[in-house]
């Protein structure tokens, strides 16, 4: 069986690869090399394999070269697009910063105007009460004057009746019939003069009352205008702040109550004012004034709360965003990892500032973060500033918004000079741009 198969295989090989001889001739001798069919088959198979491998390798190299060129071009296009986007974002950030400064100036001017209006309102209310007291006194005087005038008229009528009837009822003539008539005439003249004086005083009192009533009406109209302006100012001032807190995901009711509890001392700057009504039913103006004062108190609470939350930007100089919050590709491992903050890139030594009031809980070196500053704020919020080149604060120090805490650097695990900025609520990292964008949309 094997012999037959061998014979058939050998026959096929003889047909396609007949035996060949290669002669090697020299001057003295002639030799030859015998090439069997099996040897030729192995040689042909080896040569075919080498040629096929060369073709495949060449094709792979060409494809890699073409693909690498396309990838580099695409990477360059993406880089140019990303750079243009970063420049656009930087321009938008600068314009937003200018708008925020202008809005802050308008806000401060509105607060100044509100303070002036509040002073005018209090002075106007005091003046109104004084005028009301003066009117009451004039009305009482007028009633007494009218009563005296009626009594004088009654006495005059009685004297005239006695003179006409010649009776002796009047005490002026009761002393005898020889009483001098000029005495009676003097008495009548004096009574008439008193009557005229009473009438004149009454008319003057009525004129004064009319003038005071007109003045009170003008003051009430002025007070109403002041009330309207104050109410509009409160609406314009309180509503954007409430919107800012809600956009940052912060419950305004709980925030305001927490700030109020922190400033609950009697006589403090946030003690609500109110007009006393001395146990009487409050007037509409009093109720309106108390509502305004309560709104002013709420506005003050919002302002304090805004200082305690990180609504500011840590970099005030020119910068660009180089990395956002979220998952990103690790250039060393090639995998995806969470980036718990945002990166601001600028020159070495750029000043960095606290974004809210708080207490420094860490100021030193921390692993890949390099020089790191941690600040604990109210409402369970913490901010972190990493990769600093220099620290300006120490642990336990209380800082306010806008205080310089250090300089931008490249300490720790970095690829260049930048600031890594984090915001954590209850220990959990959140996107810092939520707070920055909420403040930019308001201011």
Image (cartoon, rainbow, N blue to C red):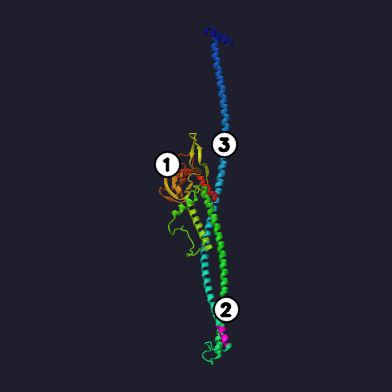
For residue 45, above or below residue 237: above
Whether residue 38 is in magenta: the answer is no
For residue 140, above or below residue 358: below
Q: Position of residue 25 (x, y in %)?
A: 55, 8
Secondary structure state at the residue bearing disc 1? loop
Residue bearing the label numbered 1: 366
The span shown in magenta is 155-163
Q: Residues within 10 Å of mark 2 (few under 14, many from 20)?
A: some
Q: Which mark is residue 149?
A: none
**First in sequence: mark 3 or mark 1?**
3
Q: Position of residue 102 (x, y in %)?
A: 55, 53
Of all residues, the one furthest to the bottom in this rendering is 178
The answer to whether residue 215 is visible is: yes
**First in sequence: mark 2 or mark 1?**
2
Q: Residues within 10 Å of mark 3 (few under 14, many from 20)?
A: few
Label 2 to label 1: alpha-carbon separation: 95 Å
Label 3 to label 1: alpha-carbon separation: 36 Å
Q: Position of residue 325 (x, y in %)?
A: 50, 41
Prevailing secondary structure class for the magenta stretch in the rendered image: helix
Are the two marked residues, 3 and 2, in contact with CB atoms closer than 8 angstroms?
A: no
Of 338 and 161, the residue lying toward us: 161
Label 3 to label 2: alpha-carbon separation: 102 Å
Are the two marked residues, 2 and 1, in contact with CB atoms closer than 8 angstroms?
A: no
Of 406 and 297, the residue lying toward us: 297
Residue bearing the label numbered 3: 76
Of 29 and 293, the residue lying toward us: 293
Residue bearing the label numbered 2: 199
For residue 267, above or below residue 32: below
Secondary structure state at the residue bearing disc 3? helix
Mark 3 or 2: the one toward you: 2
């Amino acid at each position: 069986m094997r012999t037959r198969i061998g014979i058939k295989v050998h026959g096929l090989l003889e047909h396609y690869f007949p035996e060949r001889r290669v002669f090697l001739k020299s001057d003295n001798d002639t030799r030859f090399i015998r090439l069997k069919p099996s040897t030729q088959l192995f040689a042909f198979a080896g040569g075919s394999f080498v040629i096929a491998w060369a073709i495949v390798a060449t094709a792979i190299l060409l494809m890699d070269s073409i693909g690498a060129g396309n990838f580099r071009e695409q990477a360059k296009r993406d880089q140019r697009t990303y750079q243009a986007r970063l420049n656009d974002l930087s321009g938008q950030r600068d314009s937003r910063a200018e708008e925020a400064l202008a809005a802050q100036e308008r806000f401060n001017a509105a607060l100044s105007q509100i303070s002036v209006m509040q002073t005018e309102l209090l002075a106007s209310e005091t003046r109104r009460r004084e005028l009301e007291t003066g009117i009451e006194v004039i009305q009482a005087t007028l009633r007494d004057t009218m009563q005296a005038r009626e009594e004088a008229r009654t006495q005059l009528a009685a004297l005239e009746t006695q003179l006409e009837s010649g009776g002796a009822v009047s005490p002026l003539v009761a002393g005898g019939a020889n009483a001098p008539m000029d005495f009676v005439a003097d008495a009548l003249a004096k009574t008439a003069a008193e009557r005229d004086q009473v009438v004149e005083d009454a008319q003057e009192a009525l004129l004064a009352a009319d003038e005071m009533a007109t003045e009170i009406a003008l003051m009430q109209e002025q007070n109403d205008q002041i009330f309207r302006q104050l109410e509009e100012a409160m609406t314009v001032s309180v509503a954007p702040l409430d919107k800012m807190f809600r956009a940052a995901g912060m419950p305004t009711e709980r925030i305001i109550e927490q700030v109020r509890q922190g400033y609950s001392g009697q006589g403090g700057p946030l003690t609500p004012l109110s007009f006393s009504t001395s146990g009487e039913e409050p007037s509409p103006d009093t109720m309106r004034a108390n509502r305004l004062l309560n709104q002013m108190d709420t506005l003050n609470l919002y302002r304090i709360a805004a200082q305690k939350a990180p609504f500011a930007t840590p970099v005030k100089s020119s910068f660009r965003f180089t990395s956002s919050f979220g998952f990103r590709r690790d250039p060393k491992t090639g995998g995806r990892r969470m980036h718990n903050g945002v990166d601001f890139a600028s020159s070495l030594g750029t000043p960095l500032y606290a974004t809210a009031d708080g207490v420094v809980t860490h100021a030193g070196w921390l692993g890949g973060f390099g020089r790191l500053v941690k600040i604990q704020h109210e409402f369970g919020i913490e901010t972190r500033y990493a990769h600093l080149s220099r620290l300006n604060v120490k642990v336990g120090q209380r800082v306010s918004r806008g205080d310089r805490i250090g300089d931008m650097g490249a300490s720790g695990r970095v690829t260049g000079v930048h600031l890594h900025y984090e915001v954590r609520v209850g220990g959990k990292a959140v996107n810092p741009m939520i707070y920055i964008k909420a403040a930019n949309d308001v201011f």
